[in-house]
Image: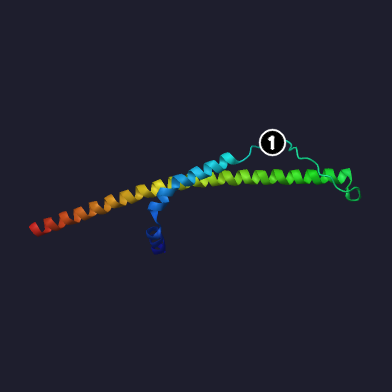
Amino acid sequence: MAIPWLMALKVIPWGDVIEHAPSVLKAARKLMERQPQPTGQSGTPATTTPVSAVPSLGELKNALIAAQGQIDRQAQTQRELTETLAELAEQNARLVSAVEMLRLRTRVLVWGGAAMLVWLVVLTWRG
């Protein structure tokens, strides 16, 4: 079961991931900043309709209340999704730095192991 993970880790172009992580984080922050702040009431002009198709004032009021509630729910959902995206981008940046550190440690460990193996072979041939 560990072999597919190892293959996946070898196939992923970590250099590209590390290179693009800061730009992903910046884009997520820009998206966060572009989100409009919650406001009170919106001032949209009323449209004119023919007199025969005019709904009652109560129907209009109910439709307006329902539409405003739906807009508020969608705006809240969009803010939550934007915050989640920003958090994911920051987590991705931390993950990329951790993976880079692990790659460096692995490289040092491999070179250290190879040096010890050479040292052991030299000691064995001498003795």
Q: Quadrant of residue 121?
A: bottom left
Q: Residue at x 22, y 55 (%)?
A: 114
Q: Nearer the viewer, residue 54 or 114?
A: 54
Q: Residue furthest right?
A: 52
In the image, 99: left or right of 91? left
Name the residue type under label 1. Thr
Element on which disc 1 rests: loop
In the image, 38: left or right of 21? right
In the image, 35: left or right of 127? right
Q: Which residue is mark 1?
A: 39
How packed mark 1 is, by other alpha carbons closer than 10 Å (few <14, some 14-19, many 20 or more), is: few
Q: Nearer the viewer, residue 88 or 43?
A: 43
Q: Is residue 51 above or below residue 12?
A: above
Specify whether residue 127 is in view: no
Q: Residue at x 83, y 45 (%)?
A: 62
Residue 55 on image: x %, y %: 88, 48
Q: Quadrant of residue 30?
A: top right
Which quadrant, please, contains the C terminus?
A: bottom left
Q: Nearer the viewer, residue 82 or 111?
A: 82
Residue 98 on image: x %, y %: 39, 47
Q: Is residue 36 above or below residue 115?
A: above
Which quadrant, please, contains the N terminus?
A: bottom left
Say how many tags the image has: 1
